[in-house]
Image (tube, rainbow, N blue to C red):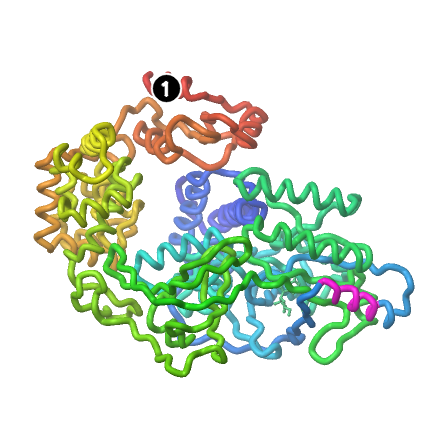
């Protein structure tokens, strides 16, 4: 798209683009119902950026381009809340909902049932968004309840929070409160990246969300996926609401993210049955987000709601720690008023945290692929939330010091984000007098080489690149499915091969012989030939896989692909200077330095040469997407759904290798939907839109021209 020539038409075009992008953001981030392919979205965004670059005066704070974060700041500005941010009285037992209801009815002098607006209690951090004439102008943390910090630069990077409300006549002032949190899946991905980068992982999604929102560098916040749920009014001028239901309905209409309200005309049993089914489907990747708030009649339904939400808690994409029960009617809320710092019209009923108590037998040190020493508590087995737990990572020395965790301690443990076991605290009363603080030895537990910390890092690393633990972990990475894909070499086998001294490097795998393998315990002829065959098959690979397999720090799959298409051969990548590397799109200084450093190492260069001498080869990458195949699918847009004969990632690679593009959602622009077994809503959508549907055979036919 050409950039408009004059400012007036640029402004007009910008407005259209902003509205369009805002619409797609809402569809994608709030409704989880993408309305456009990633490529088309990127195109719109690029067009907006081009125009803003040509007309910098037209860049406004509410532009989608401002969501990427800006230069770091020294500190957040403190700002008073127009209305104090209070907290809720809370309890851990559903019976207290009954007591709450009695109090409410007593104050209101009511004998009949009160209607309660019930919703999950989100486990994140409270935030207040300020919209003036419909435009987001501030975002305050709770702080001490009276004065908060303005974290607007970070909040702007959260895609589900509109910069501008989708309302024809927005109120002069709308303060809305809610919770910022991180979805479990985004938390898992972030921690994986933290681990890869050698930085300390977060203990749970709430900490990750809190840490991200308090970042002084908003570009870091922008790189993490945060979400929000809006649930309470602050000061509002120019709009009056009669009830919580009306308020949250209005928020959703304005495109603010809420949990959604379940239909009113449904019995509790129907609500529970329908929602549980829908939540299960959604958790397995089907269907749409499920509305979780519900109007409940009296204490009985509110208590049923508590039990229902507790039951489905693990199916939700985010952490919650209870339910909040609010008198729905705002006039009644006003009548009820406040006691001390809590409203009398609402209560929080928390769930029993899934915690357990056990004893730490020992603290073991694991050595990772990058040499990182990770302390792990080995505990007396204990059941928490139905799962037996024996190990919990203690992350690093700082974490151990902070909680003062010692061998022999009795500790409280819980499953962070409902999955990863975490030591919450030590029960000091049960500590033996002879216990001493724990220090991670500055020595690798495997090879006894000295361990050291790099600048800015909390992690100790073994410095010996030939350390058997590092070798084992590196080999496990090398043979992984997304790397060299040597299927038959499992973790156990790799360990045996290293322990037996048969393998000490990547290239050694290709030197293994039948006689060596058959001599190992529990190996039959069949399994040995299977191993050798899968090693042989792996020789024919691709450059991105080979680069990724080498396990260079910070070089994940995506970076490996970028490097492959930029350099085309492994030799050119090896020869690249720091400047050459920095010139690659999406490669920053940290990554560039790590690559340059890795290839300075003669051992690695010799390894790469040996691998190729032993038969490892790939087709040269000439052009980004077409190197590996034909142009049979040139420019065609695909959506892949259902179960296919080969892994989904490989199908994607295949399409891209033949010039096609893969996107996640079906739209009118989709050329083909490739549907495997048990294809669901995407297939329905394709039928609805009249998009061509291919089965696996049809796809093969298309590929082969
Ligand atoms: S309503 C007067 N609704 O829990 C406060 N709060 O101690 C009205 N929270 O400060 C708050 N989920 O940070 C409300 N659905 C929800 C909530 C919720 C989480 C948090 C919030 C609040 C604290 C209460």
Task: Give residue 38's quadrant in the image.
Answer: top left
Residue at far front of view: 521
Q: Residue at x 16, y 65 (%)?
A: 449
**70 horizontally vs 329: left or right:** left
Q: How many discs mark residues in the rendered view? A: 1
Choose top left, top right, bottom left or bottom right for residue 608: top left
Q: Is residue 498 visible?
A: yes
- Residue drawn at x 74%, y 54% is 304
Residue 669 or 266: which is nearer the viewer?
266
Residue 560 pos. (x, y %):
26, 45
Q: Secondary structure at mark 1?
A: helix
User: Magenta segment, which residues?
Assistant: 94-104
Give whichever of 640, 368 is nearer the camera: 368
Query: Which quadrant: the C terminus?
Result: top left
Q: Ligand 1 is in which quadrant of the figure?
A: bottom right
Please name the residue that numbered disc 1 is placed on.
700
User: 426 and 624: which one is in front?
Assistant: 426
Residue occupying the point 35% across, 80% down: 436
Up the image or down, 283 lies above or below 364; here it is above
Q: Quadrant of the N terminus?
A: top left
Q: Is residue 432 magenta?
A: no
Mark 1: few/some/many CA within 10 Å (<14, 14-19, 20+): few
- Image location of residue 134, percent across then percent down: 62, 59
Q: Residue at x 46, y 74 (%)?
A: 426
Q: Is residue 172 visible?
A: no
Residue 411 in the image: state x and y as whole percent: 47, 70
Q: Residue 473: x, y in percent?
A: 25, 51
């Amino acid at each position: 798209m050409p950039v408009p020539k004059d400012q007036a038409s640029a402004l007009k075009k910008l407005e259209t683009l902003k509205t369009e992008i805002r619409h797609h953001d809402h569809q994608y981030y709030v409704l989880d119902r993408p309305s456009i392919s990633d490529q088309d979205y990127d195109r719109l965004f690029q067009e907006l950026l081009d125009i803003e670059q040509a007309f910098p005066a037209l860049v406004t704070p509410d532009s989608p381009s401002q969501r990427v974060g800006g230069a770091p700041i020294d500190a957040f500005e403190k700002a008073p809340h127009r209305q104090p941010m209070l907290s809720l009285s809370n309890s851990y037992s559903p019976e207290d909902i009954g007591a709450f209801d009695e109090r409410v009815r007593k104050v209101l002098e009511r004998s009949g049932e009160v209607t309660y607006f019930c919703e999950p209690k989100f486990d994140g951090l409270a935030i207040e968004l300020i919209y003036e004439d419909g435009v987001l102008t501030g975002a305050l943390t709770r702080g001490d309840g009276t004065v908060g910090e303005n974290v607007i630069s970070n909040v702007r990077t959260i895609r589900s929070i509109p910069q501008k409300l989708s309302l024809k006549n927005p109120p002069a002032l709308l303060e809305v409160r809610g919770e910022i949190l991180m979805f479990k899946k985004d938390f898992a991905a972030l921690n994986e990246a933290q681990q890869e980068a050698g930085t300390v992982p977060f203990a749970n999604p709430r900490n990750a969300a809190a840490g991200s929102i308090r970042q002084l560098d908003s570009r870091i916040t922008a790189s993490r996926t945060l979400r929000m749920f809006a649930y309470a009014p602050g000061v509002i001028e120019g709009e009056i609401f009669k009830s919580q239901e009306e308020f949250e309905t209005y928020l959703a209409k304005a495109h603010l993210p809420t949990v959604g309200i379940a239909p009113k005309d449904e019995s509790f049993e129907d609500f529970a049955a329908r929602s549980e089914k829908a939540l299960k489907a959604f958790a397995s990747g089907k269907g749409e987000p499920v509305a979780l708030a519900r109007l409940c009649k009296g204490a009985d339904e509110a208590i049923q709601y508590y039990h229902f939400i507790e039951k489905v808690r693990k199916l939700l994409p985010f952490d919650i720690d209870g339910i909040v029960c609010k008198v729905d009617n705002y006039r009644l809320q006003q009548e009820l008023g406040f006691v001390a710092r809590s409203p009398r019209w609402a209560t929080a009923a928390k769930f029993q945290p899934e915690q357990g108590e056990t004893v730490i037998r020992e603290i073991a040190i694991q050595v990772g692929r990058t040499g990182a020493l990770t302390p792990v508590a080995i505990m007396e087995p204990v059941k928490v939330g139905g799962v037996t737990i024996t190990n919990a990572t203690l992350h690093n020395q700082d974490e151990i010091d902070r909680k003062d965790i010692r061998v022999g301690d009795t500790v409280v443990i819980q499953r962070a984000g409902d999955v990863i076991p975490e030591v919450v605290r030590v029960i000091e009363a049960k500590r033996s007098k002879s216990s001493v603080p724990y220090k991670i030895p500055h020595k690798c537990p495997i090879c006894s080489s000295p361990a050291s910390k790099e600048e800015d890092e909390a992690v100790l690393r073994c410095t010996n690149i030939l350390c058997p633990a590092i070798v084992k972990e590196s080999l496990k990475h090398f043979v992984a499915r997304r790397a060299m894909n040597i299927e038959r070499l499992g973790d156990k086998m790799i360990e045996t091969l290293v322990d037996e001294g048969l393998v000490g490097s990547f290239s050694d795998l290709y030197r293994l012989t039948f006689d060596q393998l058959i001599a190992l315990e529990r190996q039959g002829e069949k399994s040995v030939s299977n191993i050798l065959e899968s090693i042989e098959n792996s020789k024919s690979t691709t450059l991105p896989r080979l680069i990724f397999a080498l396990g260079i720090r910070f070089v994940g799959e995506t970076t490996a692909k970028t490097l492959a298409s930029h350099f085309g051969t492994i030799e050119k990548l090896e020869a690249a200077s720091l400047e050459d590397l920095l010139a690659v799109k999406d490669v920053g200084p940290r990554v560039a330095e790590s690559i340059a450093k890795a290839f300075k190492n003669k051992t690695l260069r010799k390894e790469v040469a040996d691998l190729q001498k032993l038969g490892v080869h790939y087709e040269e990458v000439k052009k980004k997407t077409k190197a590996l195949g034909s142009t049979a699918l040139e420019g065609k847009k695909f959506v892949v759904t259902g179960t296919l004969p080969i892994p989904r990632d490989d199908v994607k690679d295949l399409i891209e290798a033949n010039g096609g593009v893969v996107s996640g959602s079906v739209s009118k622009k989709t050329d083909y939907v490739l549907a495997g077994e048990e294809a669901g809503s995407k297939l329905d959508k394709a039928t609805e839109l009249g998009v061509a549907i291919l089965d696996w055979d049809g796809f093969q036919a298309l590929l082969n021209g």
